[in-house]
Image (tube, grey):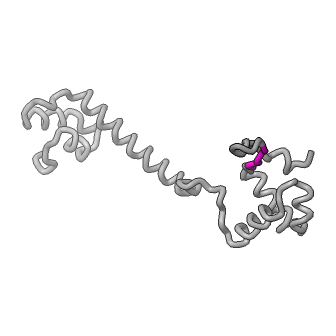
Amino acid sequence: MHALSQHRRRAEKTAPGTGQYRKNRLYTPELREEAVKLVLAQGLTLEDTAARSTIPKGTSANWVSAAKLGITPSAAPRSCTVPELEAENAKLRKELAEARIERDIVKGGSVLCAGVAAKYAVMRAMILEYPITVMCQVFRVSRSGH
């Protein structure tokens, strides 16, 4: 069996009321890429590609035309590039680190319901462990009051 045929998946459904079979073919992105590569990179004709892979000539022609135009129908609607995913990952890691610091501050100085003076006293005790700006945000006090 040819490599292209191995990737193809078929779903057969009965046409209503006729008893005949209609074939709806679903092709994997790998098969699509391989068929386009056969035509564009290896120089095979659409007929040769269709004969080798049992993919209809019209389907192969549509895929090749889309590839020449730079259209990638196999891409998911919300797919992102690797650099975009890395940037989002870095942003989320930073947010997680800030959330952990805020959580640790709250655990260490349980004075959220205390007065402003008590909050500043706890902040003075924790000044070497956490940034002042973050502590002021957690305790909801003014930075200028410190």
Q: The C terminus is located in which quarter?
A: top left
Residue 136 position in % (x across, y down): 19, 43
Residue 118 position in % (x across, y down): 10, 32
Quadrant location of residue 126? top left
Residue drawn at x 77%, y 61% is: 59
Give, as a single range, the part of the protein colored magenta: 20-25
Q: The N terminus is located in which quarter?
A: top right
Residue 24 is inside the magenta segment? yes
Classify residue 16 as left or right of residue 128: right
Residue drawn at x 15%, y 29% is: 111
Q: Residue furthest front?
A: 17
Q: Nearer the viewer, residue 110 or 34?
A: 34
Q: Nearer the viewer, residue 74 or 51?
A: 51
Q: Residue furthest bottom?
A: 69
Residue 34 position in % (x across, y down): 81, 56
Residue 40 position in % (x across, y down): 83, 68
Residue drawn at x 72%, y 52% is: 29
Quadrant location of residue 51? bottom right
Q: Nearer the viewer, residue 74 or 128?
A: 74
Residue 11 is inside the magenta segment? no
Q: Is residue 53 above or below residue 100?
A: below
Q: Is residue 69 above or below residue 8?
A: below
User: Which is the main secondary structure of the residues drawn in magenta?
Assistant: strand
Q: Nearer the viewer, residue 82 or 78?
A: 78
Classify residue 7 as left or right of residue 117: right
